[in-house]
């Protein structure tokens, strides 16, 4: 795919044009991310460096509420924020989905999942971490993945 980037004056409004053969879920995610936020990142505290950083949405594997804090997991760093999970869920692009009362994942990093006997799913992310999808959120996850894959899921 050929990519063209043109730097414009600060006074002009930024815009984006896609010349595509087919509208895919990936392109829809990019559009959603561009429309939802002009910033495309969260500001959070690094747990290792004790400083605030911009965390791009595209680097976030999942967010977890734990011990009255929200932890943001990327491939190599864990961040912390005090913003409530429900507010973050609203601010994140469509490729982020709640899978339990305490966890929101980026479905782009979902590698596979395993059905547990109790009706929950065990989701494996591309960074080898496992998270549990509560029964309450299984149908929502299936619906979202079906939309993204354009074919029904079997499990």
Image: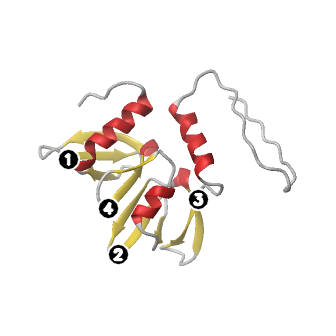
- Compared to residue 24, the image places residue 44 above or below, namely below
Residue 68, label in figure = 2
Do residues under tags 3 and 2 come within 8 Å of each other at their CB atoms?
Answer: no
Q: Give the image quarter of residue 6.
A: top right
- Compared to residue 62, the image places residue 32 above or below, namely above
Nearest the eye: 105 or 73: 105
Per the image, label 3 sits on a secondary structure element best described as strand
Q: Is residue 35 left or right of residue 118?
A: right
Residue 123 x, y percent position in the rendering:
30, 46
Sequence-wise first label, 3 or 2: 3
Residue 102, label in figure = 4
Name the residue located 32 percent from the left edge and 74 percent from the top edge. 67
Cα gap from disc 3 to disc 2, whole angstroms: 22 Å
Residue 43 x, y percent position in the rendering:
57, 67
Do residues under tags 2 and 4 come within 8 Å of each other at their CB atoms?
Answer: no
Do residues under tags 1 and 4 come within 8 Å of each other at their CB atoms?
Answer: no
Cα gap from disc 2 to disc 4, whole angstroms: 10 Å
- Compared to residue 127, the image places residue 54 above or below, namely below
Cα gap from disc 3 to disc 1, whole angstroms: 30 Å
The residue under label 3 is 41
Per the image, label 2 sits on a secondary structure element best described as loop
Per the image, label 4 sits on a secondary structure element best described as loop
Cα gap from disc 3 to disc 4, whole angstroms: 20 Å
Sequence-wise first label, 3 or 4: 3
Per the image, label 1 sits on a secondary structure element best described as loop
Name the residue located 50 percent from the left edge and 54 percent from the top edge. 92
Cα gap from disc 1 to disc 4, whole angstroms: 14 Å
Q: Is residue 145 left or right of residue 134?
A: right
Q: Is residue 145 left or right of residue 22?
A: left
The residue under label 1 is 120
């Amino acid at each position: 795919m050929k990519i063209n980037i043109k730097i414009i004056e600060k006074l002009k409004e930024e815009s984006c044009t896609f010349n595509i053969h087919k509208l895919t879920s990936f392109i829809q995610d990019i559009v959603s991310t561009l429309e939802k936020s002009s910033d495309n990142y969260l500001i959070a505290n690094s747990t290792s460096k004790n400083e605030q950083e911009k965390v791009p949405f595209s680097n976030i594997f999942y967010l977890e509420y734990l011990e009255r804090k929200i932890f943001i997991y990327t491939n190599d760093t864990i961040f912390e924020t005090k913003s409530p999970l429900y507010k973050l869920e609203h601010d994140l692009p469509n490729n982020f989905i709640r899978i339990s009362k305490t966890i929101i994942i980026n479905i782009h990093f979902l590698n596979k999942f395993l059905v547990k006997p109790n009706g929950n799913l065990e989701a494996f992310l591309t960074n080898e971490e496992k998270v549990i999808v509560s029964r309450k959120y299984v149908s929502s996850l299936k619906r979202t993945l079906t939309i993204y894959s354009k074919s029904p899921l079997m499990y």
